């Protein structure tokens, strides 16, 4: 999972720091897989007025999934000279998810079902 703002900052950093690396590929993602049930639990907590499908198990929110990614190339992109601001940003998955959901609601991109008592 990756926040689009972090993907954009990685593109900018790659352009400025490694212009000759144009054919290279960079993968921008969270280090750990984020389970669907965890995302649903978070959305249900942040937006209690909407109906979300219940997770398959209550224990599924306990942790993220296994490590799926470890980047050495993004570490190169994060390198900066002393006094120079970092070009990379990092939004944790929970922050990225909440911002995305809030923005989609504001723009009317999604119309989630309200809970029966809120109709």
Image: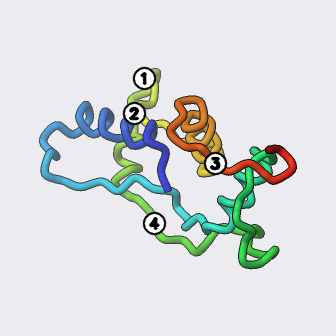
The quadrant holding residue 86 is top left
Foreground: disc 4 or disc 3:
3
**Disc ID at residue 54:** none
Foreground: disc 2 or disc 4:
4
* Mark 2 secondary-structure assignment: loop
The residues tagged by marks 2 and 4 sit, at their Cα atoms, a distance apart of 22 Å
Foreground: disc 1 or disc 3:
3
Is 12 drawn above or below residue 4 in the view shown? above
Residue at mark 4: 69
Residue at mark 1: 84
The quadrant holding residue 32 is bottom right
**Disc ID at residue 80:** 2
Decide which of tag 4 and tag 3 comes sooner along the chain. 4
At which x and y percent is residue 40?
68, 60
Is 106 drawn above or below residue 21 in the view shown? above
At which x and y percent is residue 33?
55, 67
| Residue occupying the far right of the picture | 117
- Mark 1 vs 3: CB contact within 8 A: no
Residue at mark 3: 112
At which x and y percent is residue 47?
75, 45
- Mark 2 vs 4: CB contact within 8 A: no
């Amino acid at each position: 999972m990756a926040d689009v703002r972090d993907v954009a900052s990685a593109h900018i950093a790659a352009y400025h720091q490694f212009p000759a690396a144009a054919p290279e590929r960079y993968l921008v993602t969270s280090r750990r897989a984020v389970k669907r049930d965890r995302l649903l639990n978070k959305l249900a907590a942040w937006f209690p007025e909407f109906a979300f499908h219940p997770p398959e198990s209550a224990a599924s929110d306990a942790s993220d999934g296994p490590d799926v990614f470890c980047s050495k190339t993004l570490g190169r992109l994060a390198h900066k000279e002393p006094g120079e601001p970092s070009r990379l940003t990092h939004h944790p998955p929970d922050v990225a998810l909440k911002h995305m959901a809030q923005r989609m609601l504001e723009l009317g991109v999604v119309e989630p079902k309200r809970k029966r008592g809120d109709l």
